[in-house]
Amino acid sequence: MDRILDALAAEFALPEMELLVAALVRLAMAALLAAVIGWEREQKGRAAGLKTHILVSTGSALFILAPVMAGIPGAENTRVMQGIVSGIGLLGAGAILRNREGTQVEGLTTAASIWMTAAIGMAAGMGLEVLAITATVLTWLVVAAIPKLIGSTPAHRGGPGPDQR
């Protein structure tokens, strides 16, 4: 088996197999953690659901991993991270809508979950598994568990509060 892997590595100029396996595990982790958040958003009928969250997280992890695997020093990754944060901000802005009357804004939580999913993907891409898992659990608690605990009142949905009706 080692001879086969060595032959594949030589033929395709792959980095060490350990590095490749670590990168694949990190990409898979980014996808799985994003699926937790994306599934919840999809179940609530939000525009950015499972596929969007998985793509954002996996893409963020890949942007982190690619320079490392290409041998670019880790310090250069700060520019990549800045680009991810800015780009995801634009994607999230597309999820935010105002109704015709201008009285309600929708999509803020979805935009924030996209932003968090990108951060989770970056953490997974850097090999910060505990951080990525913790951020996923906290994000899920915010978007899924907390609304059930506090109830769904118009004020919590972005509608007019009791003093604004």
Image (spheres, rainbow, N blue to C red):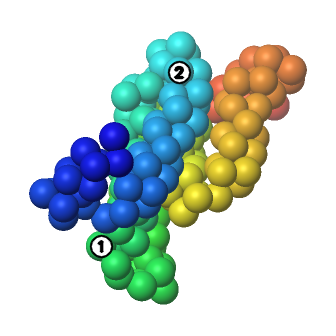
Disc 2 crowd, CA 10 A, few/some/many (<14, 14-19, 20+): some
Image vertical order of residue 34 relative to residue 123, above or below: above
Q: Is residue 115 among what the camera can see?
A: no
> Mark 1 belongs to which amino acid?
Ala
Q: Secondary structure at mark 1?
A: loop
Q: Nearer the viewer, residue 109 or 119?
A: 119
In front of the other: 108 or 133? 133
Q: Secondary structure at mark 2?
A: helix
Residue 20 % position (x, y) = 38, 55
Mark with earlier residue (1, 2)? 2
Res 36 visible: yes
Residue 123, position in %: x, y?
A: 58, 57
Camera-side residue of 38 and 165: 38
Residue type, mark 2 in image? Trp
The quarter of the image holding the N terminus is: top left
Q: Who is closer to the viewer here, 96 or 54?
A: 54
> Which residue is labeled 2 in the image?
39
Residue 157 rendering spot, x and y as whole percentages:
66, 26
Question: Pointer 1: residues within 10 angstroms few (<14), some, or many (20+)?
Answer: few
Q: Is 70 left, or right, of 79 in this rendering? A: left
